[in-house]
Image: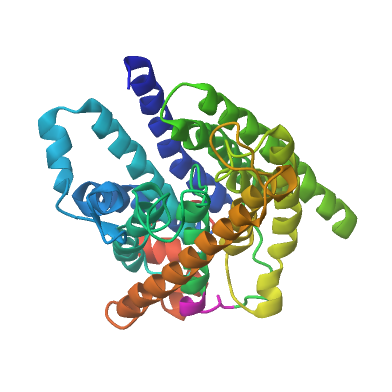
Amino acid sequence: MDSGNIAWLLTSASLVLLMTPGLAFFYGGMSRGKSVLNMMMMSFGAIAVGAVAWALVGNSISVGDSIGGLFGDPSTDFLLSSSFVSGDGESLIATGFGATFAIITVALISGSVADRMKFSAWMVFAFLWVILVYSPVSHWVWGGGILAEGGGIFTADWFPQDFAGGTVVHINAGVAGLVMALLLGVRKGFGKEPMRPHNLPFVMLGAALLWFGWFGFNAGSAFAADDAAAAAWVNTTTATAAAILGWLLVEKLRDGKATSLGAASGVVAGLVAITPAAVAVDPWGALLIGVFAGVLSSLAVGLKYKFGYDDSLDVVGVHLVAGLWGTVAIGLFGTTTFGAWDGVFTGGDLGGLWAQIVAAGVTIAYSAVATLIIGLVLKFTIGLRVSEEVEVSGIDLAEHGETAYEEAK
């Protein structure tokens, strides 16, 4: 890298780090007033344990010397000793960029466990999940592992495309959120009493910060201030705007109202869906990915009431659904402009689509099993859930000794 590219990656890493406080506002506003601080603390807690876990062994497991294509050797760069001692600025900022991805990914899961998970259990879970789930999947896709080009499963002709984290981040976090929601069980009153967002301006602010930070997430994944970064920026904007329209259209037709919560949720759905495809499609592809992401996610968020799982803040409906759609859509609309292959509708064949489906399936299976094991260990040791009394009275006061408002509702 030259100094300009390093400067861009420094900027991008800072933008991605901003996404997690942005998520704190987004999730915090969607929570009830008596649990808003706990919800925001889960995001800030993810920053703390995520960065430490990544520096210790997460980075090495992700990009270290591959062991059978399954994970990197944890001793490759333990506590970043090799990169720091060598004074390799390129490696250090690349490591920092990777840390911000690990942080936001585990923070996303917190939306599924809102109102009822012990803060201590969350902190242990987040630390273990970054090391045991996020980092190996990152190695598979970005570190030369089993889902990478020539990594073992795929040929050089067809291999999964995941520019900035459709499988590694959103499918991974979405599946983990579903598993943890099932392990914890539903909140008291779920489906029987309203659990409305307590502060919609917070939600809108959070969505805005996420959108702003996401330019570092997607355009920064080019690892250079180049044509690919520019394409990622344009596609990110196009898809996100289209997703807002798709979500609001469904709301208007279904409910007669286009809501601010719907607009903010459409922002996130569009950002999620375009993440794996940021340079794999042209603006037409980005437009289609975005509008369908808004439509599909707006329909999917209601499934929790039909199937009885309490995904409190719709991690499954938005991140898993939009992440799956964006990942698979590369096989439909992919282009060769920046090194991807043509999709089914752009002159290619079914090979690319199959590669995307297999990568998504492998990620779902591993994330589900590994997250379940971590969750069960914690459930039968330190416990996962607060008492019913704490849940009813307010988790903020019980877990943190403070409340957001004088009279939390």
Question: Measured from the top left, where is residue 228 in percent x and y?
Answer: 53, 28
- For residue 218, above or below residue 174: above
Question: Measured from the top left, where is residue 364 in percent x and y?
Answer: 50, 67
- For residue 307, above or below residue 355: below
Magenta residues span 182-188
Question: Measured from the top left, where is residue 351 in percent x and y?
Answer: 60, 56
Q: How is the image coloured?
A: rainbow
Q: Nearer the viewer, residue 150 or 167?
A: 150
357 sits left or right of 141 in the view: right
Which residue sits at x=36%, y=62%? 133
* Residue 325 visible in image: yes
Q: Nearer the viewer, residue 125 or 199?
A: 125
131 sits left or right of 41 in the view: left
- For residue 139, above or below residue 233: below
Judge whether residue 2 is colored magenta. no
Which residue sits at x=53%, y=51%? 158
Judge whether residue 187 is colored magenta. yes
Question: Measured from the top left, where is residue 14 in percent x and y?
Answer: 39, 31
Which residue sits at x=56%, y=43%? 275
The image quarter containing residue 15 is top left
Quadrant of the drawing holding the N terminus? top left
Task: Looking at this view, name the residue that lies furthest to the left.
Answer: 85
Q: Nearer the viewer, residue 29 or 236?
A: 236
388 sits left or right of 377 in the view: right
* Residue 113 visible in image: no
Which residue sits at x=33%, y=59%? 136
Q: Nearer the viewer, residue 256 or 161?
A: 161
Q: In the rendered picture of this protein, how many numbered marks are placed on residues?
A: 0
